[in-house]
Structure formats: structure tokens, C-alpha cells
Image (cartoon, helix red, strand yellow):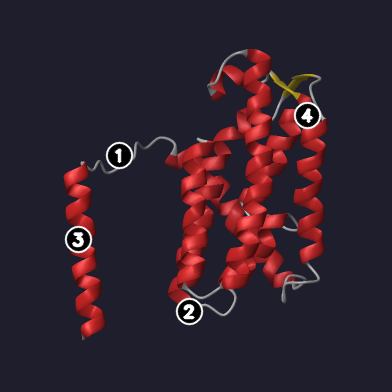
Amino acid sequence: MLGHHTVSQLGYMLLGLGLGAELGTLLYVVTHGLFKGLLFLCAEEGVEARGVRSIGELAGRMPWPAVLGLALGSAAIAGLPPLASFAAKTALTAGQPLWAKLVLVLLILGTAASFAELLPLFRGHDHGNVQGVILLSGGVLVFGVGLLWVVPGLVRPLAWFEALLAAGVGFCLHPFLRKRVFALLKFTLEGALIAALFVTVLLGLWLVV
């Protein structure tokens, strides 16, 4: 799950570059490294401690430091203030046209909804390693709070309300979305090359026109 989300989070960065939001993109690259590193570390702690990998088998059996780190990382990836990704996502949407903001909001909703899948893990069982969890958790918190004075508009109550609302709606969508099965598109190498060629031709024609 975390691996697939790493791919999806690259969409924020690429969209930010396409929209000309260099500051937001740079911030998201850094903040994503912090909270995704925390999530991977805590997941590894649980897997190593119990010898299983599925969320259902790990529910209620995770070490407490890993549980707290997973909870903090999940809140960060959903863009909750004042955590690190809140500043990056706000910077990505600042000054963007309405369609771009809607796309980014939909991405935030999808991220929050899918990370609600980890809620069964937020019950600890025993003690575990805390050094790495404390270090990365501190980075997510300190970096996020520090950016409040760097990125314009982060201290506005409206920005906090919008972030909390988007994450909250996303988490509420989870019970409805988890009952549905979404089939991913499957491409062969030949199909992918043909699609890439087709898109290249269209872009070339658009540039010529």
C-alpha cells in the first residue's frame, strides 16, 4: 500500500511542476521524504515484530511507537495542519486556477480515504524501537511548524479549515469506497509504446498549431 502511494504522491510533484508551483513542489519533495520515511519505518517495525504483512493480521498487535508513528504519518500525508505536508499542499494550490485546485482537492480526498484503511492498526500491543520514530516524527512536526512562518497564508483560519475539511471528508468516504473494487488499467509494452507515440504526436500538433 505504501509503495503504491509513493507513486501516487509523485503526481502531486509532477502536477506542481506543470502548474509552475516550484515552491510547493520543492516543499512536497522534502516533506514527502519525511512522512513517507516515517510510514515505511513504522510499517517495517510492525512486520519485523510480528512476522506478518497484512493489515488485518497486524491490527492490535503493533508496537506502540510504530502505532504512533503510523498515525502521525497518516495525518501528515492527508495534509492536516500544522504537519509538514500542510504547507506543501497549500503552496501547491496557491494562486492556481479553479480546475487545478479541484484536481488537487480530489487527490487529497483520495489519499485520506485510502489511508483510513490503516485505522485498525492504531491500537498498540507492546513496546518497540523509538529512536527512528522519534527522529522522523520530530521532523514532520518541526518542519511543518517552521513552514508556518515561511509559506504565505498558512496561518489563516480558512486554510486550516479547508485542510481539515478535505481530510475529514476523505476519511468519511473510506467505508463507502472500500466496498468497491477498482480495476487498474493493464498495459502491454506494445500498448504503452503506442499510447506514448499517440500522445507525442498530439503534443507536437498542438505546439505547431
Residue assigned mark 1: 183
| Residue where numbered disc 4 is placed | 65
Rendered image: mark on residue 97: 2
Where does residue 80 sit, x and y in percent of width and height? 68, 55
Q: Could you tell me which residue is drawn at 62 percent across and 64 percent down?
A: 26
Q: Earlier in the sequence, mark 2 or mark 3?
A: 2
Residue at 53% x, 49% y is 111
Answer above or below: position of 123 versus 80. above
Mark 2 or mark 3: which is in front?
3
Horizontal relation, residue 14 to residue 187: left or right: right
Amino acid type of disc 2? Pro
| Circle 3 residue | 197
User: Quick one: label 4 or label 1, which is nearer the N terminus?
Assistant: 4
Residue at 78% x, 57% y: name it. 143
> Which type of secondary structure does the marked residue at label 2 adopt?
loop
Label 2: how many Cα within 10 Å (few below 14, some 14–19, many 20+): few
Q: Quadrant of residue 165?
A: bottom right
Q: Position of residue 19 (x, y in %)?
A: 48, 74
- Residue at 68% x, 69% y: name it: 159
In the picture shown, does residue 201 fall above or below 163?
A: below
